Structures are given as C-alpha cells and as structure tokens.
Image (cartoon, rainbow, N blue to C red):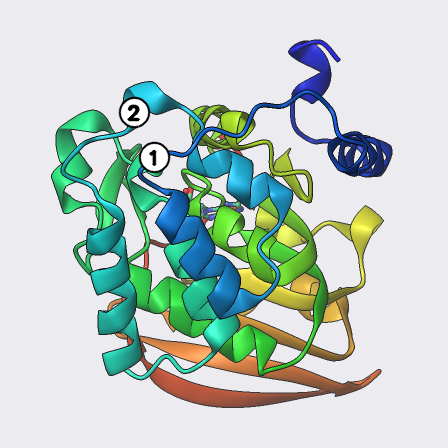
Amino acid sequence: MTGKDRRFPLSLSSVVDQQKRSSSGSPSVRVATPQTATQNAARSLTGRVTPAIERRMSANPERQQPLVSESVRRAMVARLANQGIKDKLVLGAMEAVQRHLFIEPGLVAQAYVDASIPIGYQQTISQPYIVARMIEVLRNGGVLNRVLEIGTGCGYQAAVLSVVATEVYSIERIRPLHELARTNLRPMRIANVRLQYGDGMLGLAQAAPFDGIILAAAGLNIPQALLDQMSIGGRLVAPVGARHQVLQLVERVSKFDWVHTTLEDCHFVPLQAGTV
Ligand code: SAH
C-alpha cells in the first residue's frame, strides 16, 4: 500500500484489508513504548481498544513530549470521572487517545488541562470534559454503529469517537482544518474514520441514516437536514445558542417526532454555513 492509498477518507474495503493483514501476522514489529502501560489500561477499561488505537500510541514519535506522560492523561481521566463521566468505554477512549498529538507544539503543555485550546482559524479543540460528556450522552450505554460529527477541527473528537463507534464520518467547513485533521489522523491509521470537507449543516445524505450525530459548534437551532438524517431511535447531541448556549439532546422517536432535552450550559465556537 502506498502512502497515497492510505489517505482519508479510507474505503471500507481498506478497513477490512488492513484488519486482515494485521491479524495474519504481518511483520509489524511491536516495540514497547512509554505508552504501553496506557494501552493496557485503556484495553482493560474498554475491553475493545482496536489495533488502530494501539498503533497510534507509538505513532509520530517526533511529536511525543516527555512531559506528556501517560500519568498526566490518566490524571485527566480521573478528573473526568470526578466531574461525573461514568461510561467506562468513554473514559477508556479518553485515556487511549493522545490529545497532545492534536495540539501545536507551543501549546502542548496545556494538552491535558480541562480547557479548549486554539487550533487556528479562530477555532478550538474542545475541552476534554465536554468531549467525554457529549459522547457519553450520545452513546447512552448502547452501541453506536454509524456516527456523524459536524466540526472535525483538528480531529481529536473524531479519534475518540473512533474507539466507541463502528464507523465515524466527520465534516469540516474550513479546508486547512480538514487538512490538519487528515495530517493528525494519518499516522494513527484509524481505519473507521472518514473525513469530509463541506458544510456540515447539510449533513451527509449519502451516508445517512446515523444513529448518532454530534455537533462541535453551536447554532441558534439544529439544522433540519441533520434531524432528517437521524435513524429512528437515533440520538443527536449539540450545543445550541449564541452567547448563552446549552447542550441539547435530541432523540428521534418516530419518522415525524423528535424529543428535545436541555442538559447543561456549555460554550462552543459558532456553527457557520458554507465552506471556506
Ligand atoms: N471536534 C473538534 C472541535 C473543533 S471546533 C476537535 O476535536 O478539535 C468546531 C469546528 O466546527 C471548527 O473547526 C469549525 O470550523 C467547525 N464548523 C463550524 N461550522 C461548521 C459547519 N457548518 N460544517 C462543518 N464544520 C463546521
């Protein structure tokens, strides 16, 4: 496989092929890294950390910072649990994904602080708590097959989603950020995430319906196209509002009925129409 072939979006066949190759004893050498214990911890927490997640642990060594140790990430996960995140699969995913690899080198020391961090183009990587909270609400202890994320940003939340869902589609409207996410995710070889450049307010009709939709940017309301692309029984989590924002859960209970529940205050960058 050439480097070009590995570019996102990856086809489902490449996912299957990759899994076949790794299970058929390809000559990939497993080297113990400082992250090995984290992998083990994540595996024992989630019970289903994928080979892609394991590979990502040792990916991109030049961006590994000695100060960003597994214990710092474990402390972040302990904080999330104290803040009320209960879902073990979500906590395991937060422990498995190395947030510092999504942050520019100058800001890496902030990587495991519970704060949003600039990623350029006036956008931010969401704070760990809200990423965990939204995914916990989306999952509701159930199985997520096909998930759509609006607002890829640097790709961090998409990577976390890749641990808890079978297939993840993520749309970004700012081309350089879409490219940044590609660059960040490529060395991690996550086979079940597909990145799409476009206006997420229109959803992704060709991949619909989704049993989970997550918005990483706040609109004044939730676009009807996204409500229409939910499967019946599906869940959508989104920040809604302008200066004052609340997290909303929408459950599609029938072809024509959606139930909205307001959860808690939050603060996100705005959802904007069109592409740039
Ligand atoms: N999930 C991201 C958070 C990025 S911030 C992460 O983990 O880093 C939210 C992102 O939503 C921004 O990159 C912004 O450009 C994007 N966005 C805003 N409106 C959008 C739209 N209509 N379609 C797609 N992306 C959008």
Q: Nearer the viewer, residue 85 or 69?
A: 69
The residue under label 2 is 63
Give whichever of 225, 23 is nearer the camera. 23
Proximity of marks 2 and 1: CB atoms separated by less than 8 Å: yes
Q: Is residue 5 rendered to the left or right of residue 263?
A: right
Name the N-terminal-most of marks 2 and 1: 2
Residue 92 position by quadrant: bottom left
Report x, y in % for residue 164.
59, 62
The vertical placement of 254 against 43, above or below, is below
Q: Quadrant of residue 225?
A: bottom right
Is 187 above or below relative to 15? Answer: above
User: How many residues crowd around disc 2 within 10 Å: few (fewer than 14), some, or many (20 or more)?
Assistant: some
- Where disc 2 sits, the SS reads helix
Q: Residue at x 24, y 68 (%)?
A: 243
Residue drawn 49% across the image and 44% down it? 152
- At 29% from the left and 24% from the top, the residue drawn is 63
Query: Dot 1, how many residues are within 10 Å of its Cα: few (below 14), some (14-19), or many (20+)?
Result: many
Q: Nearer the viewer, residue 150 or 7?
A: 7
Residue 10 appears in the picture as rendered: yes
Tell me the quadrant of the picture where the N terminus can be found. Answer: top right
3 with respect to 218 (left or right): right
The amino acid on which the numbered mark 1 sits, given as a three-letter code, is: Leu
Residue 247's spot in the image, x, y percent? 40, 77
**Residue 219 locus on image (x, y percent):** 44, 63
Q: Residue at x 62, y 37 (%)?
A: 195
Mark number displayed over residue 68: none
Residue corresponding to mark 1: 101
Amino acid identity at mark 2: Arg
